Amino acid sequence: MSKDTPTKTANGRRRQTNLVRGGQIRSQFDEISEAMFLSSSYAYDSAEQAQRAFKGEEDHYLYSRYGNPTVSVFEERMAMMDQAKICQSTASGMGAVFASLACLLKAGDRLVASKALFGSCDYVCTVLMPQYGVEVETIMSTDTAAWEKALSKPTNAVFLESPSNPTMQLFDIAAIADLAHKAGARLIIDNVFATPVFQQPLDLGADIVMYSTTKHIDGQGRTLGGAIVTNDEAYYQDHLRMFIRHTGPTLSPFNAWVLSKSLETLDLRVRQQSSNASALAAFLSDQPKVTKVIFPGLESHPQYALAQKQMTGPGTVLAFEVDGDQARTFKFMNALELIDISNNLGDAKSMVTHPTTTTHQRVSADERAALGINENLVRLSVGLEDIDDLKEDIEHALSA
Ligand SMILES: *Cc1c(COP(=O)(O)O)cnc(C)c1O
Protein backbone atom coordinates (compact mmCIF):
# COMPACT_ATOMS: atom_id res chain seq x y z
CA MET A 1 0.00 0.00 0.00
CA SER A 2 1.18 3.52 -0.62
CA LYS A 3 2.72 5.22 2.39
CA ASP A 4 0.53 7.22 4.72
CA THR A 5 2.57 9.92 6.42
CA PRO A 6 0.56 12.22 8.62
CA THR A 7 1.58 15.66 7.52
CA LYS A 8 0.46 18.91 9.06
CA THR A 9 -2.78 20.26 7.67
CA ALA A 10 -3.76 23.85 6.91
CA ASN A 11 -4.34 24.60 10.63
CA GLY A 12 -0.84 23.37 11.59
CA ARG A 13 -2.10 20.14 13.19
CA ARG A 14 -2.06 16.57 11.98
CA ARG A 15 -5.08 14.63 10.80
CA GLN A 16 -5.74 12.55 13.91
CA THR A 17 -5.65 15.63 16.14
CA ASN A 18 -8.20 17.31 13.88
CA LEU A 19 -10.43 14.24 14.03
CA VAL A 20 -10.55 14.62 17.82
CA ARG A 21 -10.70 18.39 18.11
CA GLY A 22 -11.41 19.88 14.69
CA GLY A 23 -14.19 22.44 14.42
CA GLN A 24 -15.01 22.39 18.13
CA ILE A 25 -16.85 25.38 19.53
CA ARG A 26 -17.31 25.80 23.28
CA SER A 27 -20.33 27.43 24.88
CA GLN A 28 -20.16 29.66 27.98
CA PHE A 29 -20.08 26.44 30.09
CA ASP A 30 -16.65 25.34 28.79
CA GLU A 31 -17.79 21.76 28.21
CA ILE A 32 -15.17 19.20 27.05
CA SER A 33 -17.55 17.09 24.98
CA GLU A 34 -19.14 18.97 22.10
CA ALA A 35 -22.50 20.51 22.98
CA MET A 36 -25.58 19.61 20.98
CA PHE A 37 -27.77 22.39 19.64
CA LEU A 38 -31.11 20.79 18.84
CA SER A 39 -32.64 23.94 17.47
CA SER A 40 -34.46 24.44 14.20
CA SER A 41 -34.34 28.23 14.35
CA TYR A 42 -32.52 31.22 15.88
CA ALA A 43 -33.43 34.54 17.49
CA TYR A 44 -32.21 37.96 16.36
CA ASP A 45 -31.41 40.92 18.66
CA SER A 46 -33.40 43.22 16.41
CA ALA A 47 -35.31 43.40 13.16
CA GLU A 48 -32.26 45.17 11.74
CA GLN A 49 -30.03 42.24 12.67
CA ALA A 50 -32.43 39.80 10.96
CA GLN A 51 -32.29 42.00 7.86
CA ARG A 52 -28.47 42.05 7.90
CA ALA A 53 -28.32 38.27 8.45
CA PHE A 54 -30.61 37.58 5.49
CA LYS A 55 -28.60 39.96 3.28
CA GLY A 56 -25.45 38.05 4.23
CA GLU A 57 -23.90 41.16 5.84
CA GLU A 58 -23.73 39.54 9.25
CA ASP A 59 -22.80 35.95 10.14
CA HIS A 60 -25.79 34.50 12.00
CA TYR A 61 -27.58 31.16 11.80
CA LEU A 62 -30.93 31.61 10.02
CA TYR A 63 -32.64 28.26 10.04
CA SER A 64 -31.35 24.72 10.47
CA ARG A 65 -32.16 23.68 6.90
CA TYR A 66 -29.42 26.22 5.98
CA GLY A 67 -27.06 25.56 8.84
CA ASN A 68 -26.80 24.58 12.51
CA PRO A 69 -23.85 24.90 14.93
CA THR A 70 -23.72 21.16 15.73
CA VAL A 71 -23.92 20.28 12.05
CA SER A 72 -21.17 22.83 11.29
CA VAL A 73 -18.81 21.18 13.81
CA PHE A 74 -19.30 17.84 12.07
CA GLU A 75 -18.82 19.36 8.61
CA GLU A 76 -15.64 21.13 9.61
CA ARG A 77 -14.18 17.98 11.20
CA MET A 78 -15.18 15.92 8.17
CA ALA A 79 -13.60 18.42 5.74
CA MET A 80 -10.38 18.22 7.76
CA MET A 81 -10.41 14.41 7.37
CA ASP A 82 -10.08 14.81 3.60
CA GLN A 83 -8.05 18.03 3.85
CA ALA A 84 -10.83 19.78 1.93
CA LYS A 85 -12.13 23.34 2.16
CA ILE A 86 -15.80 22.40 1.96
CA CYS A 87 -18.02 19.72 3.45
CA GLN A 88 -21.79 19.63 2.99
CA SER A 89 -23.56 17.05 5.12
CA THR A 90 -26.81 15.31 4.14
CA ALA A 91 -29.45 13.15 5.83
CA SER A 92 -28.13 9.92 4.27
CA GLY A 93 -25.51 8.66 1.86
CA MET A 94 -28.11 8.56 -0.90
CA GLY A 95 -29.02 12.17 -0.12
CA ALA A 96 -25.36 12.96 -0.83
CA VAL A 97 -25.27 10.94 -4.07
CA PHE A 98 -28.46 12.49 -5.43
CA ALA A 99 -27.56 16.04 -4.37
CA SER A 100 -24.03 15.77 -5.81
CA LEU A 101 -25.45 14.95 -9.26
CA ALA A 102 -28.84 16.70 -9.28
CA CYS A 103 -27.41 20.06 -8.23
CA LEU A 104 -25.11 20.01 -11.27
CA LEU A 105 -26.74 18.19 -14.18
CA LYS A 106 -29.51 19.54 -16.40
CA ALA A 107 -31.39 18.27 -19.46
CA GLY A 108 -28.99 17.77 -22.35
CA ASP A 109 -25.96 17.17 -20.11
CA ARG A 110 -23.98 13.94 -20.17
CA LEU A 111 -23.05 11.64 -17.27
CA VAL A 112 -20.60 8.76 -17.47
CA ALA A 113 -21.08 6.32 -14.59
CA SER A 114 -19.60 3.03 -13.53
CA LYS A 115 -21.88 -0.01 -13.75
CA ALA A 116 -20.26 -1.44 -10.61
CA LEU A 117 -22.28 0.69 -8.18
CA PHE A 118 -24.26 0.32 -4.99
CA GLY A 119 -27.85 -0.52 -6.08
CA SER A 120 -29.40 2.84 -5.14
CA CYS A 121 -26.54 4.77 -6.83
CA ASP A 122 -27.21 2.76 -9.97
CA TYR A 123 -30.91 3.74 -9.74
CA VAL A 124 -30.06 7.46 -9.44
CA CYS A 125 -27.64 7.30 -12.39
CA THR A 126 -29.54 5.04 -14.76
CA VAL A 127 -33.22 5.71 -13.96
CA LEU A 128 -33.57 9.16 -12.37
CA MET A 129 -30.98 11.11 -14.34
CA PRO A 130 -32.38 10.04 -17.76
CA GLN A 131 -35.83 11.01 -16.45
CA TYR A 132 -34.49 14.57 -16.12
CA GLY A 133 -33.11 14.52 -19.67
CA VAL A 134 -29.50 13.68 -18.79
CA GLU A 135 -27.73 11.38 -21.26
CA VAL A 136 -26.11 8.54 -19.31
CA GLU A 137 -23.43 6.11 -20.42
CA THR A 138 -22.48 3.30 -18.04
CA ILE A 139 -19.14 1.52 -18.09
CA MET A 140 -18.82 -2.11 -17.12
CA SER A 141 -15.02 -2.28 -17.35
CA THR A 142 -12.28 -1.37 -14.87
CA ASP A 143 -10.01 -0.88 -17.89
CA THR A 144 -9.08 2.81 -18.23
CA ALA A 145 -9.28 2.47 -22.05
CA ALA A 146 -13.07 1.93 -21.78
CA TRP A 147 -13.33 5.18 -19.81
CA GLU A 148 -11.15 6.97 -22.33
CA LYS A 149 -13.54 5.96 -25.10
CA ALA A 150 -16.64 7.12 -23.17
CA LEU A 151 -14.88 10.37 -22.28
CA SER A 152 -13.90 11.20 -25.85
CA LYS A 153 -17.19 13.19 -26.00
CA PRO A 154 -17.90 16.34 -23.98
CA THR A 155 -19.24 15.24 -20.59
CA ASN A 156 -20.43 17.05 -17.46
CA ALA A 157 -19.98 14.51 -14.68
CA VAL A 158 -18.34 11.15 -14.01
CA PHE A 159 -19.48 9.00 -11.09
CA LEU A 160 -17.74 5.90 -9.75
CA GLU A 161 -17.06 3.87 -6.65
CA SER A 162 -13.65 2.33 -5.87
CA PRO A 163 -13.40 -0.31 -4.46
CA SER A 164 -16.85 -1.25 -5.74
CA ASN A 165 -19.61 -3.07 -3.92
CA PRO A 166 -19.56 -6.05 -3.58
CA THR A 167 -16.83 -7.42 -5.88
CA MET A 168 -14.07 -4.99 -4.85
CA GLN A 169 -13.20 -3.75 -8.33
CA LEU A 170 -10.79 -0.83 -8.41
CA PHE A 171 -10.70 2.08 -10.85
CA ASP A 172 -7.63 4.17 -11.57
CA ILE A 173 -8.86 7.42 -10.02
CA ALA A 174 -5.90 9.58 -11.13
CA ALA A 175 -6.14 8.41 -14.75
CA ILE A 176 -9.94 8.77 -14.91
CA ALA A 177 -9.71 12.23 -13.29
CA ASP A 178 -7.41 13.34 -16.13
CA LEU A 179 -9.77 11.95 -18.76
CA ALA A 180 -12.80 13.51 -17.05
CA HIS A 181 -11.15 16.92 -16.94
CA LYS A 182 -10.19 16.74 -20.63
CA ALA A 183 -13.86 15.99 -21.41
CA GLY A 184 -14.95 19.00 -19.32
CA ALA A 185 -16.41 16.85 -16.53
CA ARG A 186 -16.18 16.84 -12.76
CA LEU A 187 -15.21 13.50 -11.24
CA ILE A 188 -17.36 12.39 -8.28
CA ILE A 189 -16.09 9.47 -6.17
CA ASP A 190 -18.18 7.37 -3.81
CA ASN A 191 -15.46 6.67 -1.22
CA VAL A 192 -17.54 4.60 1.19
CA PHE A 193 -15.72 1.28 0.83
CA ALA A 194 -12.21 2.72 0.90
CA THR A 195 -13.02 5.11 3.79
CA PRO A 196 -11.24 8.46 4.16
CA VAL A 197 -8.64 6.62 6.27
CA PHE A 198 -7.32 4.60 3.31
CA GLN A 199 -8.09 6.67 0.22
CA GLN A 200 -8.02 10.39 -0.43
CA PRO A 201 -9.58 10.85 -3.87
CA LEU A 202 -9.17 14.66 -3.85
CA ASP A 203 -5.38 14.14 -3.73
CA LEU A 204 -5.70 11.74 -6.67
CA GLY A 205 -7.44 14.40 -8.78
CA ALA A 206 -11.15 13.82 -8.06
CA ASP A 207 -13.29 16.96 -7.74
CA ILE A 208 -15.99 15.76 -5.37
CA VAL A 209 -16.02 12.92 -2.83
CA MET A 210 -19.13 11.57 -1.15
CA TYR A 211 -19.70 9.36 1.87
CA SER A 212 -22.47 7.44 3.48
CA THR A 213 -21.54 8.33 7.06
CA THR A 214 -23.96 5.54 8.04
CA LYS A 215 -21.11 3.12 7.37
CA HIS A 216 -17.63 3.44 8.92
CA ILE A 217 -17.99 7.04 10.07
CA ASP A 218 -20.80 6.18 12.47
CA GLY A 219 -19.41 2.64 12.61
CA GLN A 220 -21.66 1.61 15.47
CA GLY A 221 -24.95 1.20 13.64
CA ARG A 222 -26.85 4.18 15.07
CA THR A 223 -27.41 6.94 12.54
CA LEU A 224 -27.97 7.56 8.85
CA GLY A 225 -26.00 10.39 7.30
CA GLY A 226 -24.05 11.54 4.30
CA ALA A 227 -21.33 14.01 3.35
CA ILE A 228 -20.02 15.67 0.20
CA VAL A 229 -16.45 17.02 0.35
CA THR A 230 -14.80 19.22 -2.24
CA ASN A 231 -12.31 21.99 -2.90
CA ASP A 232 -14.35 23.15 -5.90
CA GLU A 233 -15.69 26.53 -4.74
CA ALA A 234 -17.66 27.08 -7.95
CA TYR A 235 -19.38 23.71 -7.59
CA TYR A 236 -20.37 24.55 -4.03
CA GLN A 237 -21.38 28.18 -4.52
CA ASP A 238 -23.11 27.87 -7.90
CA HIS A 239 -24.75 24.47 -7.48
CA LEU A 240 -24.61 22.47 -4.25
CA ARG A 241 -25.23 25.16 -1.63
CA MET A 242 -28.51 26.38 -3.11
CA PHE A 243 -29.68 22.86 -3.97
CA ILE A 244 -29.32 21.71 -0.35
CA ARG A 245 -30.83 24.88 1.11
CA HIS A 246 -33.91 24.74 -1.04
CA THR A 247 -34.58 21.01 -1.34
CA GLY A 248 -33.90 20.05 2.29
CA PRO A 249 -31.89 16.77 2.53
CA THR A 250 -30.50 18.20 5.77
CA LEU A 251 -28.61 16.19 8.41
CA SER A 252 -30.23 16.39 11.85
CA PRO A 253 -28.11 18.03 14.60
CA PHE A 254 -28.52 14.91 16.74
CA ASN A 255 -27.03 12.68 14.05
CA ALA A 256 -24.30 15.27 13.36
CA TRP A 257 -23.36 15.17 17.04
CA VAL A 258 -23.14 11.36 17.05
CA LEU A 259 -21.03 11.51 13.88
CA SER A 260 -18.64 14.14 15.25
CA LYS A 261 -17.98 11.94 18.27
CA SER A 262 -17.52 8.96 15.93
CA LEU A 263 -14.85 10.78 13.92
CA GLU A 264 -12.72 10.89 17.08
CA THR A 265 -12.26 7.10 16.88
CA LEU A 266 -12.67 6.56 13.11
CA ASP A 267 -9.00 6.02 12.35
CA LEU A 268 -8.48 3.55 15.22
CA ARG A 269 -11.61 1.57 14.40
CA VAL A 270 -11.01 1.38 10.66
CA ARG A 271 -7.37 0.30 11.07
CA GLN A 272 -8.32 -2.45 13.53
CA GLN A 273 -11.24 -3.61 11.35
CA SER A 274 -8.91 -3.65 8.35
CA SER A 275 -6.34 -5.68 10.25
CA ASN A 276 -9.10 -8.19 11.17
CA ALA A 277 -10.24 -8.21 7.51
CA SER A 278 -6.68 -8.92 6.31
CA ALA A 279 -6.40 -11.81 8.78
CA LEU A 280 -9.77 -13.22 7.67
CA ALA A 281 -8.88 -12.87 3.98
CA ALA A 282 -5.77 -15.01 4.57
CA PHE A 283 -7.76 -17.45 6.71
CA LEU A 284 -10.54 -17.81 4.11
CA SER A 285 -7.96 -18.34 1.34
CA ASP A 286 -6.85 -21.50 3.19
CA GLN A 287 -10.36 -22.94 3.63
CA PRO A 288 -11.07 -25.89 1.31
CA LYS A 289 -14.79 -24.96 1.15
CA VAL A 290 -14.01 -21.43 -0.10
CA THR A 291 -13.25 -21.25 -3.81
CA LYS A 292 -12.39 -17.57 -4.18
CA VAL A 293 -11.54 -14.60 -1.92
CA ILE A 294 -11.67 -11.03 -3.19
CA PHE A 295 -9.86 -8.42 -1.08
CA PRO A 296 -7.64 -5.54 -2.29
CA GLY A 297 -4.99 -6.55 0.26
CA LEU A 298 -4.46 -10.00 -1.28
CA GLU A 299 -1.79 -10.40 -3.96
CA SER A 300 -4.32 -12.54 -5.85
CA HIS A 301 -6.58 -9.46 -6.34
CA PRO A 302 -6.51 -8.65 -10.09
CA GLN A 303 -5.72 -5.01 -9.31
CA TYR A 304 -3.38 -5.51 -6.39
CA ALA A 305 -0.83 -3.12 -7.96
CA LEU A 306 -3.44 -0.36 -8.32
CA ALA A 307 -4.55 -0.90 -4.71
CA GLN A 308 -0.93 -0.48 -3.64
CA LYS A 309 -0.71 2.73 -5.66
CA GLN A 310 -3.89 4.58 -4.75
CA MET A 311 -4.87 3.26 -1.31
CA THR A 312 -2.98 3.32 1.99
CA GLY A 313 -4.83 0.28 3.35
CA PRO A 314 -7.04 -2.49 1.96
CA GLY A 315 -10.30 -1.63 3.74
CA THR A 316 -12.64 -3.59 5.97
CA VAL A 317 -14.88 -5.44 3.51
CA LEU A 318 -14.13 -8.62 1.60
CA ALA A 319 -16.08 -10.99 -0.63
CA PHE A 320 -15.74 -14.73 -1.09
CA GLU A 321 -17.34 -17.64 -2.88
CA VAL A 322 -18.55 -20.74 -1.06
CA ASP A 323 -17.97 -24.07 -2.82
CA GLY A 324 -21.55 -24.82 -3.93
CA ASP A 325 -24.83 -23.24 -5.06
CA GLN A 326 -27.15 -20.68 -3.46
CA ALA A 327 -28.66 -23.27 -1.10
CA ARG A 328 -25.19 -24.22 0.17
CA THR A 329 -24.32 -20.53 0.58
CA PHE A 330 -27.52 -19.85 2.55
CA LYS A 331 -26.72 -22.85 4.74
CA PHE A 332 -23.33 -21.34 5.55
CA MET A 333 -24.85 -17.94 6.37
CA ASN A 334 -27.61 -19.44 8.51
CA ALA A 335 -25.06 -21.48 10.47
CA LEU A 336 -23.12 -18.38 11.59
CA GLU A 337 -23.69 -17.77 15.30
CA LEU A 338 -21.68 -14.60 15.89
CA ILE A 339 -21.61 -12.79 12.56
CA ASP A 340 -24.98 -11.19 11.71
CA ILE A 341 -26.82 -11.43 8.42
CA SER A 342 -27.34 -7.78 7.49
CA ASN A 343 -26.88 -5.52 4.48
CA ASN A 344 -25.09 -2.75 6.39
CA LEU A 345 -21.29 -2.49 6.45
CA GLY A 346 -18.45 -0.72 8.19
CA ASP A 347 -19.90 -1.54 11.61
CA ALA A 348 -18.08 -2.68 14.77
CA LYS A 349 -20.22 -5.83 14.47
CA SER A 350 -19.26 -8.18 11.63
CA MET A 351 -21.97 -8.82 9.05
CA VAL A 352 -22.51 -11.03 6.00
CA THR A 353 -24.71 -10.26 3.00
CA HIS A 354 -25.80 -12.33 0.01
CA PRO A 355 -25.68 -9.62 -2.70
CA THR A 356 -27.50 -11.63 -5.42
CA THR A 357 -30.71 -11.86 -3.39
CA THR A 358 -30.52 -8.56 -1.48
CA THR A 359 -28.48 -5.47 -2.42
CA HIS A 360 -28.12 -6.46 -6.10
CA GLN A 361 -31.48 -8.17 -6.56
CA ARG A 362 -32.61 -5.30 -8.84
CA VAL A 363 -29.61 -5.77 -11.16
CA SER A 364 -30.34 -8.09 -14.13
CA ALA A 365 -28.90 -11.62 -14.06
CA ASP A 366 -26.70 -10.82 -17.10
CA GLU A 367 -25.25 -7.73 -15.49
CA ARG A 368 -24.70 -9.58 -12.23
CA ALA A 369 -22.80 -12.28 -14.11
CA ALA A 370 -20.67 -9.66 -15.87
CA LEU A 371 -19.91 -8.02 -12.50
CA GLY A 372 -18.99 -11.39 -10.97
CA ILE A 373 -21.90 -11.33 -8.51
CA ASN A 374 -22.54 -15.07 -8.42
CA GLU A 375 -25.09 -17.06 -6.38
CA ASN A 376 -22.33 -18.37 -4.09
CA LEU A 377 -20.81 -14.93 -3.41
CA VAL A 378 -20.88 -13.64 0.18
CA ARG A 379 -19.86 -10.13 1.24
CA LEU A 380 -18.31 -9.88 4.67
CA SER A 381 -17.97 -6.60 6.51
CA VAL A 382 -15.41 -7.20 9.22
CA GLY A 383 -15.92 -5.64 12.64
CA LEU A 384 -14.06 -5.28 15.89
CA GLU A 385 -14.72 -8.66 17.54
CA ASP A 386 -11.80 -10.87 18.60
CA ILE A 387 -10.27 -12.30 15.43
CA ASP A 388 -10.19 -15.86 16.82
CA ASP A 389 -13.93 -15.78 17.57
CA LEU A 390 -14.57 -14.62 14.00
CA LYS A 391 -12.41 -17.41 12.57
CA GLU A 392 -14.11 -20.04 14.75
CA ASP A 393 -17.57 -18.83 13.71
CA ILE A 394 -16.69 -19.02 10.00
CA GLU A 395 -14.94 -22.39 10.30
CA HIS A 396 -17.91 -23.87 12.16
CA ALA A 397 -20.46 -22.45 9.66
CA LEU A 398 -18.47 -23.72 6.65
CA SER A 399 -18.60 -27.25 8.03
CA ALA A 400 -22.41 -27.08 8.55
C1 LIG B 1 -24.60 2.59 1.90
C2 LIG B 1 -24.00 3.15 0.69
C3 LIG B 1 -24.56 4.28 0.07
C4 LIG B 1 -25.84 4.92 0.55
O1 LIG B 1 -25.77 5.40 1.85
P1 LIG B 1 -27.03 5.50 2.85
O2 LIG B 1 -26.46 6.19 4.04
O3 LIG B 1 -27.51 4.11 3.10
O4 LIG B 1 -28.07 6.31 2.16
C5 LIG B 1 -23.93 4.76 -1.05
N1 LIG B 1 -22.81 4.18 -1.54
C6 LIG B 1 -22.26 3.10 -0.97
C7 LIG B 1 -21.03 2.51 -1.56
C8 LIG B 1 -22.83 2.53 0.16
O5 LIG B 1 -22.28 1.46 0.72
Image (tube, rainbow, N blue to C red):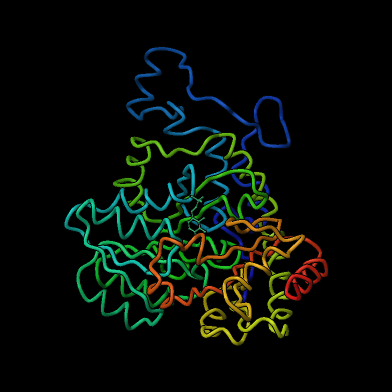
Q: Quadrant of residue 158?
A: bottom left
The foreground one among 198 and 159 is 159
Q: In the image, 109: left or right of 365? A: left
The foreground one among 395 and 113 is 395
Does residue 73 lie above or below 275 as drawn?
above
Q: Is residue 87 visible?
A: yes
Q: Is residue 2 visible?
A: no
Q: In the image, 55: left or right of 274? A: left
Question: Residue at coordinates 26% horizontally, 74% vertically from top-left?
Answer: 151
Question: Residue at coordinates 38% horizontally, 68% vertically from top-left?
Answer: 364
x and y, in percent, of residue 195 in the image = 57, 62
Question: Residue at coordinates 61% horizontally, 65% vertically from top-left?
Answer: 7
Outermost residue, left direction?
A: 108
x and y, in percent, of residue 267 in the image = 67, 59
Does residue 318 lie above or below 156 as drawn?
below
Q: In the image, 110: left or right of 67? A: left
The foreground one among 255 and 183 is 255
